[in-house]
């Protein structure tokens, strides 16, 4: 097993609402669920959300081991997750030192766990265009949800996700035709989730470089997150 070294730290003080996993249900089921939710909210208090985070201004590649398998792309190499941290950085804004990391791409990883044993893991990168391939800025995010177990208060073992959504918000705009392999990041706003069909227009628009059918296997099959206070201190690969 390999531990990840701790780099620049930051605490995200945001509150995430209760989010359902899996694909949408039928209309009648949704109505029943909504009614049940309203009734439960009127008589009980929502489970507490514990939030932990780490910011990596130097980029994901600086971790000793990265649970984001950006070179594996799920079950089929080449598809499943846009590799912003590697080749994507070549088309983003450079700092005065000629390096993108910390300027054109700043990653934040946050883990929210609920008392009901469900987690939301968010990997988001603030990206800024270089005004050649891309312009303006936006936030590119992967959000995974699934079950977790915790043997101790600072050790959370995350099972494979049951739902994933990929989104790009802000004013980030692609200036090229996307023919180059490093130009597959779309213009904002854009999103797909693990319920989207692989043939959907939002998928084919970026040359099928993010396949919804592979999203649930594109990052990890399981990892233990170790936290200290409100900070993710390390991640242990358990596969």
Image: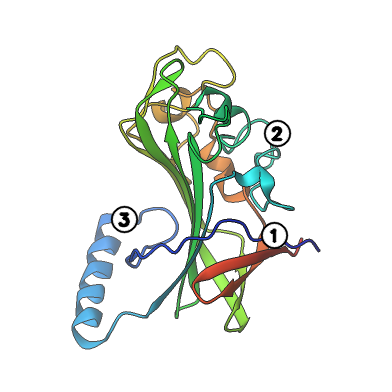
In this rendering, the answer to whether 220 lies above or below 231 is above
> Horizontally, is 64 left or right of 207 in the view?
right
Mark 3 nearby-residue class (10 Å; few <14, some 14–19, many ≥20): few
> Horizontally, is 100 left or right of 196 in the view?
right
Q: Nearer the viewer, residue 137 or 27?
A: 137
Callout 1 touching callout 3 (CB < 8 Å): no
Q: Label 2 vs label 1: CA separation?
A: 27 Å
Image quarter of residue 130: top left
Mark 3 highlights which residue?
26
Mark 2 nearby-residue class (10 Å; few <14, some 14–19, many ≥20): few
Residue at 44% x, 36% y: name it.
Answer: 127
> Horizontally, is 127 left or right of 14 in the view?
right
Mark 1 highlights which residue?
5
Q: Nearer the viewer, residue 113 or 102?
A: 102
Residue 77 is marked as 2
| Mark 2 residue element | loop
Image quarter of residue 1: bottom right
The x and y percentages for residue 237 are: 73, 61
Residue at 65% x, 65% y: name it.
Answer: 234
Q: Label 1 vs label 3: CA separation?
A: 45 Å
Q: Label 3 vs label 2: CA separation?
A: 34 Å
Mark 1 nearby-residue class (10 Å; few <14, some 14–19, many ≥20): few
């Amino acid at each position: 097993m390999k531990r990840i070294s701790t780099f620049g730290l930051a605490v995200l003080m945001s509150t995430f609402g209760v989010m359902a996993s899996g694909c949408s249900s039928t209309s009648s089921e949704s109505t029943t669920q909504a009614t049940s939710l309203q009734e439960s909210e009127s008589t009980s208090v929502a489970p507490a959300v514990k939030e932990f985070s780490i910011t990596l201004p130097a980029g994901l590649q600086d971790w000793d081991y990265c649970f984001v398998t950006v070179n594996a792309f799920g079950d089929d190499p080449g598809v499943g997750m846009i590799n912003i941290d590697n080749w994507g950085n070549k088309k983003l804004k450079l700092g005065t030192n000629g390096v993108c990391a910390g300027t054109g791409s700043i990653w934040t990883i946050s883990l929210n766990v609920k008392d009901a044993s469900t987690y939301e893991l968010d990997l988001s990168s603030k990206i800024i265009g270089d005004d050649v391939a891309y312009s303006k800025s936006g936030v590119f995010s992967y959000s995974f949800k699934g079950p977790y177990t915790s043997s101790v208060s600072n050790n959370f073992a995350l099972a494979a996700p049951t739902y994933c959504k990929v989104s790009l918000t802000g004013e980030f705009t692609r200036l090229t035709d996307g023919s180059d392999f490093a130009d597959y990041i779309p213009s904002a706003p854009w999103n797909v989730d693990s319920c989207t069909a692989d043939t959907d227009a939002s998928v084919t628009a970026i040359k099928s470089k993010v396949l919804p059918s592979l999203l649930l296997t594109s990052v990890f099959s399981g990892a233990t997150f170790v936290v200290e206070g409100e900070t993710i201190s390390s991640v242990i690969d358990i596969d």
